[in-house]
Amino acid sequence: MSNTILLIFIAMIGGVFVTIQAQFMGLLDKNIGTIESVFITYGGGGLCVGLIMLFLRGGNLAAFQSVPIYALLSGVVGLFIVGSIGFATPRLGLVPASTLLIAAQFISAAIVDHFGLFGADIRLLTMPRFCGMGIMMVGIWLIIK
């Protein structure tokens, strides 16, 4: 299996898990509330990854000093991601909430790539990419209409 195929497979599995997490978060949000569902999600995930990190390699947290300071905000940003998924899913439905999340992700990713923000490699927003995003926006409008 080539490296590209493996990366595509991993990304697709991640997408499946985003959907599953959105549904689980929606159920938690509906039954116990947004803040509580975010706590359960981050607490459970933090505990699991902490144990995995310790058992597999003992952790490499001392190297955090070599990362830009804004990268340390990834956990805070993740709270907004998880919170918005949990809040929007039971109110909009899984497909509309996921569609809007992905659309916003595409648009913001194109901006980050185009300008090389936050240390990203510059990948210009070409006309084919722009047209593809336009087609996607029409699809999104049809889905949430």
Image: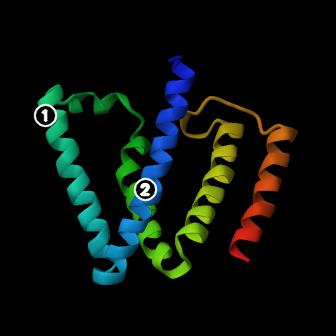
Disc 1/disc 2 C-alpha distance (Å)? 24 Å
Going from N to C along the chain, the mark reached first, 1 or 2, is: 1
Q: Residues within 10 Å of mark 2 (few under 14, many from 20)?
A: few
**Which quadrant would residue 135 be assigned to in this image?**
bottom right
**Which quadrant would residue 52 be assigned to in this image?**
top left
Q: Determine the residue positioned at 30% across, 33% down.
A: 64
Quarter of the image for the C terminus: give it: bottom right
Query: What amino acid does circle 1 point to?
Result: Leu
* Residue ranking furthest to the top: 2
Q: Secondary structure at mark 1?
A: helix
Q: Position of residue 20 (x, y in %)?
A: 41, 59
Total marks shown come to: 2
Q: Determine the residue positioned at 63% across, 46% down.
A: 109
Q: With respect to residue 145, does 112 lie above or below? A: above
Q: Determine the residue positioned at 64% across, 35% down.
A: 116
**Residue tagged by mark 1?**
54
Residue 77 numbered tag: 2
Is residue 40 shown left or right of residue 126? Answer: left
Query: What amino acid does circle 2 point to?
Result: Val
Is residue 81 shown left or right of residue 34? Answer: right
Tell me whether circle 1 and circle 2 mark residues in contact (CB < 8 Å): no
Q: Position of residue 98 (x, y in %)?
A: 56, 63
Q: Residues within 10 Å of mark 1 (few under 14, many from 20)?
A: few
Q: With respect to residue 8, does 69 lie above or below? A: below
Q: Secondary structure at mark 2?
A: helix
Q: Position of residue 27 (x, y in %)?
A: 36, 75
- Quick check: can you spot residue 87? yes
Which callout, 1 or 2, points to the residue nearer the camera? Answer: 1
